[in-house]
């Protein structure tokens, strides 16, 4: 299982999220607070994740900005479904639980991963993938999970604010 650790801990810089497997840091993620973009360090390679032309993309930082090795785009707003392309492997993303904001990742009719979260007051996303899934694919899917969680939280905050304002007259 890959899980997001607490920012700035376990020997990573301030504002950097350690990504853990069995308690050991296997990658880092520095996500923007304002944009849907991040920089990931996976082994010796640096990845750039960003939103471009309506899709989330992942590329090696050294690749041209318009290129993409990993992609994800929303296929249904109402159902919350997405489709991803992980280096040529198609993956369908569907909601596993609306209450917990978790997802199922399916390729070729088989579940290849699912998301979850750590418990507690400040839950952080986790990703459990099938053995053999490349770490860069797992990190991209975990970043996708972070983006979807932020979007869901923003929508919930907006809806709650509108209900409070609407009910206060």
Image (tube, rainbow, N blue to C red):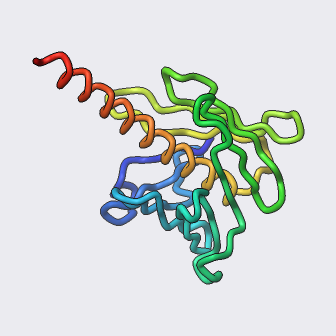
Q: Most extreme residue toward the right, as rendered? A: 108
Q: Residue at x 36, y 53 (%)?
A: 7
Horizontal side of 39 relative to 123 (left or right) equals right
Total marks placed: 0
Question: On screen, 167 above or below 118?
Answer: above
The C terminus lies in quadrant: top left
Question: On screen, 50 above or below 61?
Answer: above
Q: Residue at x 75, y 57 (%)?
A: 86
Q: Residue at x 47, y 32 (%)?
A: 118
Question: On screen, 17 above or below 76?
Answer: below
Residue 141 x, y percent position in the rendering: 63, 49
Q: Most extreme residue toward the left, as rendered? A: 169
Q: Residue at x 62, y 69 (%)?
A: 43
Horizontal side of 154 relative to 136 (left or right) equals left
Front position in the image: 84 or 6? 84
In which quarter of the view is residue 22 placed? Answer: top right
The N terminus lies in quadrant: top right
In which quarter of the view is residue 69 placed? Answer: bottom right
Front position in the image: 41 or 75? 75
Residue 97 x, y percent position in the rendering: 58, 22
Residue 95 x, y percent position in the rendering: 62, 29
In which quarter of the view is residue 60 placed? Answer: bottom right
Residue 16 x, y percent position in the rendering: 39, 61
Horizontal side of 97 relative to 90 (left or right) equals left
């Amino acid at each position: 299982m890959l899980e997001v650790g607490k920012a700035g801990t376990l020997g990573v810089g301030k504002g950097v999220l350690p990504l853990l497997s069995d308690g050991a840091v296997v990658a880092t993620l520095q996500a923007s607070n304002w944009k849907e973009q991040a920089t990931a360090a996976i082994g010796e390679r640096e990845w750039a994740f960003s939103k471009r032309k309506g899709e989330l993309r992942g590329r090696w930082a050294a690749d041209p900005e318009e290129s993409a090795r990993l992609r994800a785009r929303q296929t249904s707003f109402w159902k919350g479904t997405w489709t991803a392309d992980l280096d040529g492997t198609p993956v369908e993303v569907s909601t596993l639980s609306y209450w917990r904001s978790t997802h199922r990742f399916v390729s070729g009719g088989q579940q290849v991963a699912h998301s979850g979260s750590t418990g507690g007051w400040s839950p952080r996303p986790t990703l459990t993938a099938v053995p053999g899934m490349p770490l860069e694919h797992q990190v991209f899917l975990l970043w996708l999970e972070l983006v979807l969680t932020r979007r869901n939280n923003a929508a919930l905050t907006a809806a709650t604010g509108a209900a409070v304002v609407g009910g206060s007259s």
